[in-house]
Every structure is written in C-alpha cells, then in structure tokens.
Image (cartoon, rainbow, N blue to C red):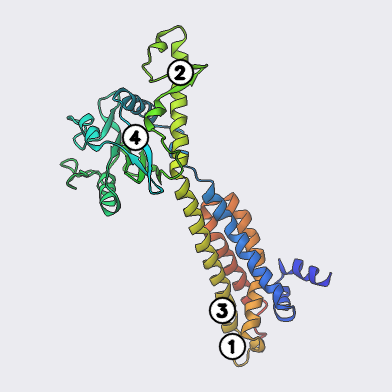
Amino acid sequence: MKNFKLILKSLINNDACIEGGRTKRWFFAVIFVVLSVILATLPIMVNALKVNGSDFTDNNYVYNYDNAIVAFSDHLQDNNLSMSVNEIENERYLNVDQERWNSVHSGEDNIFNQYVHLNNDGDIDFEVYFTNTVGDEYATYVDHVQKNESPINGLPRDPDASPRTISFLLFGRKQMIGAFYQPDNSTAVTTISGDYLTLPLGFNFKSLATAVVDNVTYVTSHDAKFSEVGGAVTLEKYRDQVFYAWDDAYDDLHYVTKMSTARNLTLIFLGVDVGLIAFMGLMIFILTRGKKNPFRIYTFWETQKISYWASFAPSVLAMIGGFIFAQYAPMMFIMLIGIRIMWMSMKSLKPAM
C-alpha cells in the first residue's frame, strides 16, 4: 500500500520520484521505463495504422478525379487493356503488355505513352502511367514524372520547366505511386505508394469498370442500359461504386507500406524514447556532481532510476495528447520528459543557497 501511494504521488511530485529511484527495488524503475516507452509510442503506432490507401481521395474536393477515374476504368474496358496481378516464384507483379499499352496511349496529348483525361476546358487534369522497369530504373522513372519531366529522356515537359500540377497514378511492374494535386498548385494534397502483394492473385484493374447496381451488371459508364428509365440515377450509383472500388484497391495497394511504416516508426521512437530517458538520467547525474552539491552522493544507477520514475507521468500525458493531436504525437514525450527533468533539476535537485 505504501508503494502504491508513492507511485501515485510520483506522477505529480518530483520528490517522490527521487525517493522511489533511490530507495525502492530496481524492478520498479524498470517497470516504469517499459510502461513509459510503450505508452509514449502507442499513439504513434496507432496513428500510423489508421492511415489507409483510400485516404488518397478522402478530400472535401476531388478536383474532377471522380470523373477521371471512371473514364480511365471505361478506357481499360473499352480497349480490353488488361492490368492483372500475377505471381512468379512467390513474387507478385503487375502484368501489362507494354507494347500494347504504348500503342493505345499514343497521340498529341499522351506523348509519354500515358493515359490522359481532359477536363471541360480541354486541359489535362489526370494521368496514368505504366512502366515495366524495376529497381533504379523505376526510381528514375518515378522521379521524372514527379518533377514533370519526360520519363523517356528526363527533359522538361514544357519550355517553362514548370513543376507538376497534374494528379497522376504511376503503375510499375512491382510497385505503384500516385499524387493528388489541386489545380494549378504544385504541392500534392495527398500521395499514395504501395505494391501488389495484398491484391488477390488474378485481380485485374480493368474489372473495376464493372459494377452491379440493383442486381443489374453494368460494364462501363456508357453501358446501353443507362439509357433506360431512371438511368441517370442508376449511373450516379454506378459511378460511386467505381469510385469506391478504386478506394478498396488503394487500401490493398498501400497495406504492406502502411504496416512497414507503422513498424519502423514504432521501433524508431521506442529506441529514441529509451535513449532519451537514459540521457535524462545522465543529465541528473552530471548536474549533481558539484563539489558542494549535497546531491552528489547519488550514484549513476540511482539517477537513472530517478529518471525512469519521472518518465511515467510524461508518457501518460504524451499518450493522451498524441491521440488528440496526432500530428504532434512524435514530439509529445520528448518535450514533456525534458520539461519534467528541467523542473526537477530547478526545484528538487537545486542545492540550498
């Protein structure tokens, strides 16, 4: 019971942290530091896991993307252009006939063998690229597209060498990437990257043009059945289904990237937080080394345990704040533990004058 009271008191009282670190068994301090780093990194991990590929189009304004993605789906179906997920030696890849892709996408607007969608003013507002390249060649291709350069020779796409402002999807043999832009703005609103590992084997992007509405199957948005009575309402439902079918595909495309990002971020911040708590213990040790400092009797291990005890309250606050203010979650614990150790050094560990 006495230990429990001291633990509760240590949440707000620095003297209790010092007492606990110096007088209580070592395993109390170890439990505190383990709980602290877990609680501090929990919102970082959870927030990373909440990111989905479908967030790519989760905006208040879609800037004509809804029309463009339906038109691209129609385009694949109309031209019988297959983009299917295959597997060789346990490796998933996107199977597209590059020669056929290039022959279908050739003209005045698509000089880089890309699909282009034109808005009502006749300007390109959406593009889809495909490349069979992998590795460094794929990375170079992506870099050229992102910089609004020719992916063929890397030269500027236009005489003014203007940055990219056109939304795009780029499908590679093993990976994909996309960026969503507000018209005439060179900063991407959202991006997506991923691979084909979690898409069903045999999945074909061409199939996303087919949707069932009220038990009737429609192949494209210009299916003859839309000319029947009530066709306009049905067409709108169909377009919504195609839109959300692409969102489901984005979720699968991004899944492996999301999981690896969440894992890496969690491990990185676990390491950062453990190192930070140990560093704060070192700071307490250094700050109490003065010849006339009455606290110089504290050993290095005792100052470490004091830091471990002091880390628990900041971790609880960092967890709560990290869920409320997700964008600040990575920095919450770093700031709070620093503030608490500074407070402790100025109040409880300051020699009497």
Dot 4, crowdedness within 10 Å: few (<14), some or many (≥20)? many
Q: Are circles 4 and 1 on residues that touch, CB within 8 Å?
A: no
| Mark 1 → mark 3, Cα distance in angstroms | 10 Å
Query: Label 3 sits on what residue type?
Result: Met
SS at badge 3 = helix
Question: Which residue does the image show at 47% across and 40% down from the upper left?
Answer: 251
Q: Which one is earlier in the sequence, the residue at label 1 or at label 3? A: 3
Q: Are circles 4 and 2 on residues that touch, CB within 8 Å?
A: no
| Mark 2 → mark 3, Cα distance in angstroms | 69 Å
| Mark 4 → mark 2, Cα distance in angstroms | 21 Å
Q: Which residue is mark 3?
A: 283
Q: Which residue is mark 4?
A: 83
Could you tell me which quadrant the N terminus lies in?
bottom right
* Residue 61, percent from left and from top: 43, 32
Could you tell me which quadrant the C terminus lies in?
bottom right
- Residue 350 visible, this angle: no
Indicate whether 156 appears above or below 309.
above
Dot 1, crowdedness within 10 Å: few (<14), some or many (≥20)? some
**Residue most toward the top?**
229
Query: Label 1 sits on what residue type?
Result: Arg
Q: Which residue is mark 2?
A: 217
Q: Which one is earlier in the sequence, the residue at label 2 or at label 1? A: 2
Indicate whether 65 appears above or below 335.
above
SS at badge 4 = loop
Q: Nearer the viewer, residue 177 or 85?
A: 85
| Mark 2 → mark 1, Cα distance in angstroms | 79 Å
SS at badge 2 = strand
Q: Are circles 2 and 3 on residues that touch, CB within 8 Å?
A: no
